[in-house]
Amino acid sequence: MKYPSRVKLVDVGPRDGLQNEKSPVPAAVKIELVHRLQDAGLREIEVTSFVSPKWVPQMADAAEVMAGIQRKPGVRYSVLTPNMKGFEAAVSPPRELWPDEIVVFAAASEAFSQRNINCSIAESIERFQPVVEAARANNIHVRGAISCTVGCPYEGDIAPGRVEMVARLLKGIGVQHIGIADTIGVGTPLKVQRAMEAGLKHFDINDVSGHFHDTYGQALSNTLVCLEMGVWQFDTSSAGLGGCPYAKGATGNVATEDVVYLLQGMGIETGIDLDKLIDAGKFISDYLERKPNSRAATALLNKRMN
Ligand code: HMG
Ligand code: MG
């Protein structure tokens, strides 16, 4: 079996991880988390979302967080922008505060699209089109997330053909990279493989990533099957933080610590210092007064104490 020799992890903890927290997390804490993640060697961090504060109050401080980060050369900072209003807010400050990448987020399920972004899949593509054009005209990289690629909390199983259709539509409007998301963590390896293959019909292997929530404990297996396909980019969340406000009961993304431990054990390069990463996860978990939701972090923290 030939695995990629190098993997890029995008830590989505500050965004996907924190968006669902009930009590407001101060901007300073989010900024500190970003700083710790970049110091641990993360080369891409999904920082925040420019979405309606009525829908996702936790992300209301998006501009403040973006302005407060001391950027590290070589790190890509991404944000979610579902429409022109969000994009304009992301690029209203001076250029040095702009995101390097924006994420438009579609779904392979009509019901989820309606609940998450209040429009149909077709309408979402229409809304994204000017956002993608404006971003690319300004040299901002564009990623598209596809939610519910194997299962939907409202529609149940999702056929790979739906994923292929949304991937084709996103490609058609100029999206440069797609993330195949298992929003509610119901996927198992063969289903995830089929969803990934559907995305790969329209995007190159270098332009796809896996985004696996770990609700059913399958995310590491799903990551492994994608590695076997040659996929080398994954979204992961520090300390396994998170969940989506429109996917009740779904837990966070697979913990960055667990994926780094897996990759290190396989001799795959990530550029990430696991000890510093564990400290970053512990920092935010301590703030939230809970234990890191990562088996590897828990084991290594226990080992430190003995
Ligand atoms: P809408 O209500 O259809 O939009 O929301 P609208 O254009 O009719 O505007 C309604 C109000 O929202 C107006 O304010 C707008 O100004 C405001 P009002 O006049 O009522 O005071 N508004 C905004 N405010 C700030 N920023 C904006 C913005 N747009 C409109 N960008 C919208 C449409 C998409 C904005 C809304 O549905 C929304 O914000 N949804 C939240 C979506 C979200 O953040 N979901 C979680 C992230 S996605 C995710 O977690 C999945 C992912 O991880 C992959 C996976 O795991 O599946 C990526
Ligand atoms: Mg997600």
Image (cartoon, helix red, strand yellow):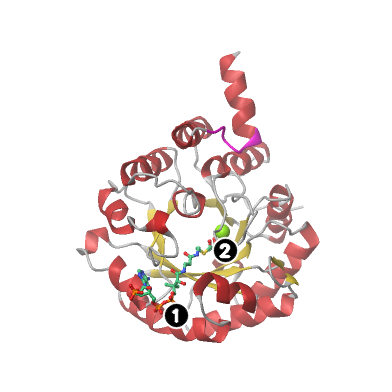
Instruction: Give the x, y percent position of residue 97.
Output: 25, 59
Tell whether position 294 is magenta: yes
For the stretch drawn in magenta, the main secondary structure is: loop
20 relative position to 189: left or right: left
135 relative position to 198: left or right: left
Instruction: Give the x, y percent position of residue 6.
Output: 57, 50
- Is ligand 1 closer than 8 angstroms to the Cβ of mark 1? no
Q: Nearer the viewer, residue 260 or 291?
A: 291
Instruction: Give the x, y percent position of residue 215.
Output: 69, 51
Q: Nearer the viewer, residue 46 or 157?
A: 157
Q: Give the residue drawn at x 54%, y 70%.
A: 116
Q: Amino acid at mark 1?
A: Phe
Q: Give the residue drawn at x 44%, y 80%.
A: 128
| Rendered view: 26 above or below 101 | above
Quadrant of ligand 1: it is: bottom left
Q: Amino acid at mark 2?
A: Tyr
Instruction: Give the x, y percent position of residue 125.
Output: 50, 83
Q: Give the residue drawn at x 62%, y 63%.
A: 181
| Rendered view: 120 above or below 148 | below
Tell me the SS state at disc 1: helix
Tell me the SS state at disc 2: loop
Residue on which the image places disc 1? 128
Residue 5 visible in rendering: yes
Residue on which the image places disc 2? 246
Disc 1 residue crowd, few under 14, some 14–19, many 20+, Cα 10 Å: many
Of labels 2 and 1, the one closer to you:
2
| Rendered view: 178 above or below 130 | above
Q: CA distance from mark 2 to mark 1?
A: 20 Å
Tell me which segment is drawn in magenta: 290-295
- Is ligand 1 closer than 8 angstroms to the Cβ of mark 2? yes
Name, please, the residue furthest toward the top.
Answer: 306
